[in-house]
Image (spheres, coloured by chain):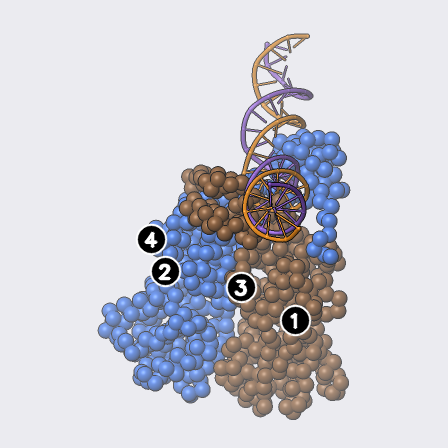
Chain colours: A blue, B brown, C purple, D orange
Amino acid sequence: MRNTRKSGKVTLADVARAVGVSAITVSRALREPDKVSATLRQRIDHTIRELGYVPDPVARALVTGRTNIIGVIIPSVTNNVFADVLRAVYDVIRMTDFGIQLGNSRYSLLEEEKLVRLFLSQKPAGLIVAGVDQSEATRSLLVEASCPVVQIMEVGDDPIDMMVGFSHYEAARAATRHLIDRGYRRPAFVAARMDPRSQRRLQGFREETEVQGLFDETRIITTQRPSSVAMGVELFGELMSVAPDADAVLCNNDDLALGVLFEAQRRRFRVPDQLGICGFNDLEFCAVAEPSMTSVRTFRHEMGERAIRMLVSAIEGKRPEEALVDLGYEVVHRRSTR
Amino acid sequence: MRNTRKSGKVTLADVARAVGVSAITVSRALREPDKVSATLRQRIDHTIRELGYVPDPVARALVTGRTNIIGVIIPSVTNNVFADVLRAVYDVIRMTDFGIQLGNSRYSLLEEEKLVRLFLSQKPAGLIVAGVDQSEATRSLLVEASCPVVQIMEVGDDPIDMMVGFSHYEAARAATRHLIDRGYRRPAFVAARMDPRSQRRLQGFREETEVQGLFDETRIITTQRPSSVAMGVELFGELMSVAPDADAVLCNNDDLALGVLFEAQRRRFRVPDQLGICGFNDLEFCAVAEPSMTSVRTFRHEMGERAIRMLVSAIEGKRPEEALVDLGYEVVHRRSTR
DNA sequence: TTGACGAATGTTAGCGCAATCATTTATGAC
DNA sequence: GTCATAAATGATTGCGCTAACATTCGTCAA
């Protein structure tokens, strides 16, 4: 009957009675120790430990109208990119007594909206959401929300509240320029899971190649299906059957790039001479791959860290001066491009 | 002043007043629709929508003593293994109105204990924790907990409550046997982040090689540092300097295996003839690597799914017959071993 | 028509805590 | 000693909801 065990709960009132003070004094000793005399505070602390009192966050939330839960809504839990951001979030909130409620919108605006409604109904202390492409309804929910909100992964005009990210368009454009600078003349773009960020990267690729007079629609291979290494293999195969003369591939992420690399090796392509490969995100493996992988470095850990710090500051009433942080990117040239 | 906006909250009482019934009737219409007459239920539903009433989960939790939050405590958010499990959890939970509070214990028993205390104080509906090696204090907290608990990733004697996983010892032993069966006579074991599961895999490797008279301490390379592809590269380098005659490597996970593969390619090893490589977990990339990677398949998605289903059933009062589920494993032979 | 019984709805109380305002107790200037 | 002032502590109230018990209504057999 583990579900029905009496918990023998110790309340504030119990502590107060044991110490011989009123409940509110114990409450204050916990939350504003300065406002309670030193000796009393000690007696209270001692009794709390003796009785094993643990504050009830639910009751506290009911009366204050706020929980100490920070909601984080991301489109995927398996994507390494978000995992890195999350890790940073945890590294920071570990020191605090905030908890993280994680929502997975699975790249669906509808599911995202449902999650935002659900989270907001629970009175979160703050919210972190990925991207800038919320539905109108979601957006207005967040604008009206009575808690701070940070959008991450991207930068854009009119943040809902605060924002930390970088320009996917610019990053992809810089990577494309890199390929062209390295002498590749028939660059291709390969992408899966065409979410809004991927779309903007494609746009960066498109415009840079157009400007340089090297654009060719047939060298753009995309799919809505989820991204994976295997998908990189498949899409590269498709590219080779459609545009076998492509001499470089800008991949929408490193997983795809790894798949392209494997498949290129299977087909005995000489990388980087015959085929240049550029990934996106610069996951840890890029540096040690064989050959090492050129990629666009993004500052995911810093993104998570900045986001959660801004959020916590805002929760505590100290809004940051800059509501919009652009962390930039960096094209890391390695041996998969000449 | 987005923090102080009046929310103009609509309560149960408001709905009740508008409909002309008592609050409890509205409450019932929401939670036990059968107990309210059809016509009244319709009027109530209509008014709820009209007024935009949203139940307050905090108030509900205060009076019922339970939230609808399920706590999940894992040691790492960047490890793909846990991500796959999490994804399954979300796939199931999406249909329900449970939320997931995710805790990251960072492979520390102390942090895990802190998290369990924190989570339990918040009256979760249920708890999922990774592994079977909780501290004594954590364990007794969980045993005393007034909610169902599922341990995942491993199986072991005396579950705290319920358990879904597999035997890491047996899986590693089977992989070792595979290497030996394939004719490798000087197998090595490479591992990072020696958590309890890694220890048990090492034990499996050790005992199988001992039984077969092929054990050699110098071919065991481990480190406490976190696992990564780069670490695979490094540890393989170490192995080669200490035991250059090793003819196969059982890696503690696929990331390490990928690192070993890259470094082996750099050193012009012929895989699988000169060097066999076996990973662990059979991440998606294994099947499409070049050469494709032998690995031990583990059923991570099913693990998450079973765990969350068992948990939700238990929350609803229907305990599963079998409290302990062993999902097994499968050695997948590919071209990285002959 | 009566009464009995189940279905439908209502009344009361309180979950544990903190906001608000009220009171008491030190502290120190003169 | 007196008074003003600050510091420390307390009483009351209610957050929004549901458990437990209480009442009313409708239906149908005799």
How many tags in the picture? Answer: 4
Q: Amino acid at mark 1?
A: Gly
Residue in view at x 46 percent, y 78 percent: A230
Of callouts 3 and 1, which one flags the residue occurring earlier in the amino acid sequence? Answer: 3
Residue in view at x 66 percent, y 59 percent: B317
Q: Pointer 2: what residue?
A: A167
Distance CA(mark 3)–CA(mark 4): 32 Å
Distance CA(mark 3)–CA(mark 1): 18 Å
Q: Describe the element under mark 1 as helix, strand or loop.
A: strand
For residue B292, say whether it is visible. yes
Please give the chain letter of the residue carrying mark 4: A
Please give the chain letter of the residue carrying mark 3: B
* B55 on left or right of A56: left
Q: Quadrant of residue B228?
A: bottom right
Q: Nearer the viewer, mark 3 or mark 4?
A: 3
Quadrant assignment for the C terminus of chain A: bottom left
Q: Pointer 1: what residue?
A: B165
Q: Describe the element under mark 3 as helix, strand or loop.
A: helix
Residue in view at x 74 percent, y 87 percent: B212
Q: Pointer 4: what residue?
A: A157
